[in-house]
Every structure is written in C-alpha cells, then in structure tokens.
Amino acid sequence: MYFIYGMYWCFNAVTRAEGEPSAVLVRALEPLAGIDLMRRRRGMRSHRDADLTNGPGKLCQALGVTGHHNRYPLDVPPLVIRAGSDVPREAVIVTPRVGISRSAEWPLRWFVAGSPFVSKTPSHFPRLPADR
C-alpha cells in the first residue's frame, strides 16, 4: 500500500489480514545493490550512499516506487521484501515519530542504533531500547 505525501510517494507494508488496520511505513533502507540506478533516479552525483534512501520519499524515488505499485503483493516481483540479517534487540532503538503532531509521543519509530542509513532523530527525542 502506498500513499502520496506532498509530492513524494511513501511505501507502507500492510502487516495484517485484510480488514485489520496495521501497516509499517518503510522510512529507510541500506542499499546493497543498484546504487548507480538509485543515484540516477534521485539525480544525485556525489552525495553519500546513506543519503539515497534515508527518508520515505527518498526511498521511493530511489527505488522507482510510484502509485502504479499500489496494492502489489510484497512477496513476488516487482516488489519483494526478503528476510534480512538478524539484528539483536539490544541494537534496536525506539523513538517517537518525526514531523507529526497527533500522538507524537508514541514510540513508533524503530531503527538500528548508529545506522547512517536512517534520517536524523531530533536530539531532544527520548531513545528507548527495543528490549524493554
């Protein structure tokens, strides 16, 4: 499921059965392949690889995700989410979401601590361990 935010698309992965509201906004990823194509799609020449996909709009632009992909399954091409490497729970940080006003204090932003591929979190935001 995708939605448009401003002039950029965002990528949500629905995580429950149809009729049960629940989704994950994919905010960033670490590019492992296709970096030159991502740079072309984003119009980038000399920026850091970490800046290619470190925000929901940037991620969709780099991957070429548009409204055309709405409601595609995520287990067959052209969009596939695969299991990655396990991350120890103690390496995961949880913070409030950035840039919202309603329910802003909810701890809904999960990421690997120290990853350069995640957009910056305001320094005044609380950081909680995922294993609490």
Image: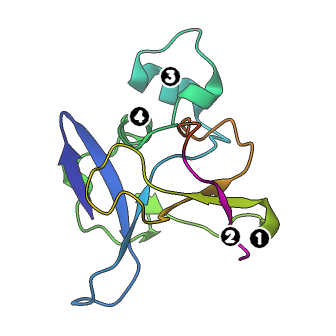
Q: Does the magenta stretch mainly form a helix, a strand or a loop? A: loop
Secondary structure found at label 2:
loop
Amino acid type shown at disc 2: Ala
Tell me the CA gap for discs 3 and 2.
33 Å
Residue toward you, 122 or 19: 122
Q: Is residue 102 magenta?
A: no
Tell me the CA gap for discs 2 and 4.
26 Å
Vertical order, 95 against 48 (above or below): below
Which numbered mark, 1 or 2, is in the foreground of this view?
Answer: 2
| Percent x, y of residue 101 | 27, 51
Q: What stretch is highlighted in magenta?
A: 125-132
The mark that comes first in sequence, 1 or 3, is 3
The mark that comes first in sequence, 2 or 4, is 4
Residue toward you, 113 or 20: 113
Amino acid type shown at disc 1: Arg
In the picture, the disc for residue 89 is: 1
User: Label 4: few (<14), some or many (≥20) within 10 Å?
Assistant: many
Callouts 1 and 2 close, C-beta under 8 Å: yes
Q: Is residue 127 magenta?
A: yes
Residue of label 3:
39
Name the residue rendered at 58%, 14% in the picture.
Answer: 47
Residue toward you, 107 or 111: 107
Callouts 2 and 4 close, C-beta under 8 Å: no
Name the residue rendered at 35%, 54% in the picture.
Answer: 11
| Percent x, y of residue 102 | 25, 58
Residue of label 2:
130
Which numbered mark, 4 or 1, is in the foreground of this view?
Answer: 1
Residue of label 4:
58
Is 85 placed left or right of 44 in the picture? right
